[in-house]
Image (cartoon, helix red, strand yellow):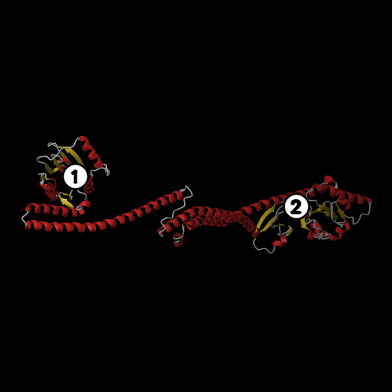
Amino acid sequence: MKTLLHSSFYKKIQSTMIIFIIIPLIIASVLSFFLIEDLVIEKVENTHKNVVNMMASDINDMVDEVIDTTNLYGKPQTNILDHMKNIADSETISSYEIYQNYQEISDYLSIAFSSVSSLNPETFYMNKEQLLMMGNNNGLTHEELHNRLDPRLTQEEMAEINPNQTYFLPAEDLNLAGVGETSPRLYAVRAYKDFVANEVMGILYLGISADYFAQLFRDVESGAFQLLDQEGQSLVRSAGYQALEAEDDLLITKAAIPSTDWELVYYVPSGDIMNEITSTFSFYAVIIAVCILLFLGMSFFIAGNIYRPMHRLKNTVEAFGEGDLQVRYPVETKDEIGLLGGAFNNMLDQINHLLEKVKQEEAEKRQLELRALFAQIRPHFLINTLNSIKCSLLLEDDAVHSKKIESLTRLLRANMRAEELTTIREECNLLYDYIEIMKLRSDLPIELRTTISEELESFKVPRLLLQPIIENAIIHGFFDMPEAPVIEVQVTKQLNDVVIEVSDNGVGMDQASRHQILQHIQTEDYTSDHIGMRNIYQRLKLTYKQTDIDILPNEWGGTTVMFAISSKVDPLIEER
């Protein structure tokens, strides 16, 4: 079973067909053979019984017909008894009167028993002095019959014969056996008595032809018959009886013949029945075997067609797993395997695309790492240089420029850690440094005001978040040099949101301009010029779960940029 479970899908299909179809079919066939054996034997016995009963009935009818005919022969109305009486003491035909009696009896033998036509009987009559009178259907001549028919019945024996009864004797008992193939096997014997003289006048012999029994037993193909008398002695045997005497296992069927107390016995070798059953079963077994072979051939063909695409698919998977990235499954059909193969090819294409993308990203990552390494070198060099300049200025008592240098240094350090989070208070402190630098650049007396709720001073935001907004206010809002430029930053708590507002008193924007900028920011349009604002918005969206942005006019006539940040911080950002 383990071998089957670890075998190929093709072998599993074939093994399943053999286990669940062919083996049960063979087992069912063998069990059917043994189960129907007794039923077949019982049916055969019933058939044999019907055949034997029918034959016994035929023999019984024949016996009744013979008895009736012999009774008719001795009736007074026929005058035959007178002829028998007249010729009873004659040893030869010595006178015309004896001849007339002789001829009357012979003619009546031919006429009276012609009605028993199915028997084709041989008939003759012998008086008490052994004078023989014959009918027309005798196979022997008068002399041959007289020589064979010894006077077995003496006067004493004849006197003991019941004249009212017909006796049936085998031809052997009368020394008449073996005359020919069609000679009678059985004789009906009837004595006729002169009741006045109380003497037997003669005996009538009626030979039942062997053809009668041959015709009776002809339609039975196997086995043999035997007719037994009331004492169990054999009267007639069919042709195949001698061949069965050596058989030990015989199926015997018997039927009684009421008229004579005889018994008809039918012998059939059990082997013949089993041979018939076996031959029938063998015939069906051959048919089943042919069907199984056809089924196996068809199953191998169908299973091969099912397994072949799967085998190709398996080879494709193995080849791809071994590194052949260009291998593909040849889709030839539109069935489930074809759909699976097509989907697998698409998956391989996607994997190749992802591998190429990963390779490209890895290359870009290496370049970025190299750039980052070089970028780290430059700020450190600049910071160290600026610190040296600041120290020189302090030594020369130039506090103003020294402060400017210090602000620039803090901005550079913050820029080096731009990916980190900082508090809103620290972010606002950096804005003061940035304003100091922008004052130097633009020569504007910019005033920065920051108002932060105490509870929000430690609220974390991305570093350098507000610097692009301050830069836009200075460059775009104060381009006409106002007398007292002011930038105000307010951080408040409104319900569950942290609201950051950056306002200026610059020239402001019309509604169309504000709407256009918001649209560019929220649709991630990288072709526009508002990169700083979009960067702020994307950084807030990545840091917090929900962020809204809006651009509004204020009471100074300038512009207010407002951020509404959900106070529920993303756990990933907190871990970072």
Residue at coordinates 72% horizontally, 62% vertically from top-left? 242
Residue occupying the far front of the picture? 396
Circle 1 sits on which residue? 565
Circle 2 sits on which residue? 215
Residue 262: x percent and y percent? 71, 55
Residue at coordinates 75% horizontally, 54% vertically from top-left? 214
Q: Does the image show residue 304?
A: yes
Q: Does the image show residue 499?
A: no
Q: Quadrant of residue 185?
A: bottom right
Q: Quadrant of residue 149?
A: bottom right
Between the residue at mark 1 and the residue at mark 2, the CA separation in whole angstroms equals 120 Å
Q: Callout 2 environment at 10 Å: few (<14), some (14 to 19), or many (20+)?
A: few
Residue occupying the far bottom of the picture? 246
Residue 438: x percent and y percent? 13, 47
- Report the label total: 2
Q: Is residue 46 left or right of residue 361?
A: right
Q: Callout 1 environment at 10 Å: few (<14), some (14 to 19), or many (20+)?
A: many
Foreground: 21 or 354? Answer: 354
Earlier-in-chain disc, 1 versus 2: 2
Please state which of the two labelled residues, at mark 1 or mark 2, is closer to the viewer.
1
Foreground: 272 or 546? Answer: 546
Locate the N terminus by quadrant.
Answer: bottom left
Q: Which residue type does callout 1 highlight? A: Ile
